[in-house]
Image: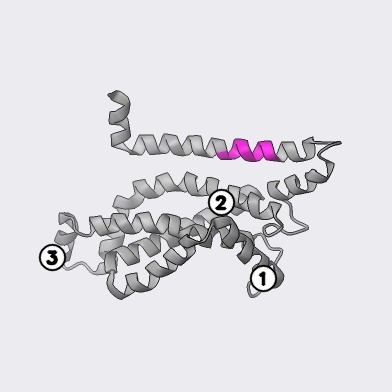
Amino acid sequence: TSLLIGGIATVIIIVFGTLVGLLTGYFRGPTDMILRPLMELIWSFPVVILGVALGTALALGGIGPVKGNSLYIPAFIIGVVFIPYLGKPIRGEVLRLREQDFVEAARVQGMGSWRIMLSEILPNLMSMITVFVPMMLAYAILLEAYLSFLGAGVQAPNASWGTLISDGLAYIQTTPTYSLVPGAMLVLTVLSINVVGDGIRDALDPRAQVRVRT
C-alpha cells in the first residue's frame, strides 16, 4: 500500500510539477503571476501539517465519487503537497533554457510555444526530472507513513506501514515487533530508494564525476 500510494503520488508530482514549471518559466507574465503564488502558498506550509489538514478534510467527505477511505485520497494529497518542490526547480531551469540560442533558433524557424516547450526544452529537463523521481518517491512514502500514523492518511480497512506502526504501539511492551518490523521496512525502503537516487544523480551529473576524479 505504501509503495502504491508513493508511486501514484510521484506520477502526480512529476506530471503536474513539470507542467507548472514549464508554463511559469516559459510564458512568465500573467501565467507566472497566477501559478507561482499558488506554488509559494503550498511551499510555505510544512508538508506534514498541510497533509494532515487536507487528509482530515478529505477523509470525511472524499472527492466526488471517490470515497474518503480510498487509497487515491492520500496519493492525491501527497502529490499536491510536493508539486512546488519540483515545479520551482523546473521553473528556474526553464527560465535559463528559454534564453539559449537553440530556443531562439526554434522561434526563428516559426515553431509555436508549445512545440518549443515539448521538443526543445523538455528533453533538456529529462536529466533533472530523472534525478527527482526517486527523491520524490522516497518523500512520498515517508509522508504517507506520517499521515497514516497520525490517522490522516490510509483509512480502514486498508493498512500501510504507518497504520501498522500506530497500531503496534499498543503492544510495544509485550510484542515490540508489531511496530519495529513495519518501521524497519519503511526505513530500509526509503534508504534503498535514496541510494538509487544518489547513483542516478552521479551518473547524470558530469560535475559529480569530475569531483570524484579529482
Q: In whole angstroms, how far apart are the C-alphas of marks 2 and 3?
A: 42 Å
Does 188 lie within the magenta span? yes
Q: Residue at x 44, y 62 (%)?
A: 16
Q: x, y percentage for residue 158?
A: 74, 55
The crowd level at tag 1 (other Cα within 10 Å; few <14, some 14-19, many 20+) is some
> Mark 2 or mark 3: which comes first in sequence?
3
Q: x, y percentage for residue 30?
A: 31, 75
Mark in front: 1 vs 3: 1
- Mark 1 secondary-structure assignment: loop
Viewed as shown, does residue 117 lie left or right of 15?
left
- Mark 3 secondary-structure assignment: helix
* Disc 1: which residue: 62
**Three-letter residue code for mark 2:** Ala
Q: Main secondary structure of the magenta part?
A: helix
Q: Which quarter of the figure has residue 17?
A: bottom left
* Disc 3: which residue: 108
**Three-letter residue code for mark 3:** Val
Q: Are marks 1 and 3 in contact (CB under 8 Å)?
A: no
User: Where's the C terminus, which quadrant?
Assistant: top left
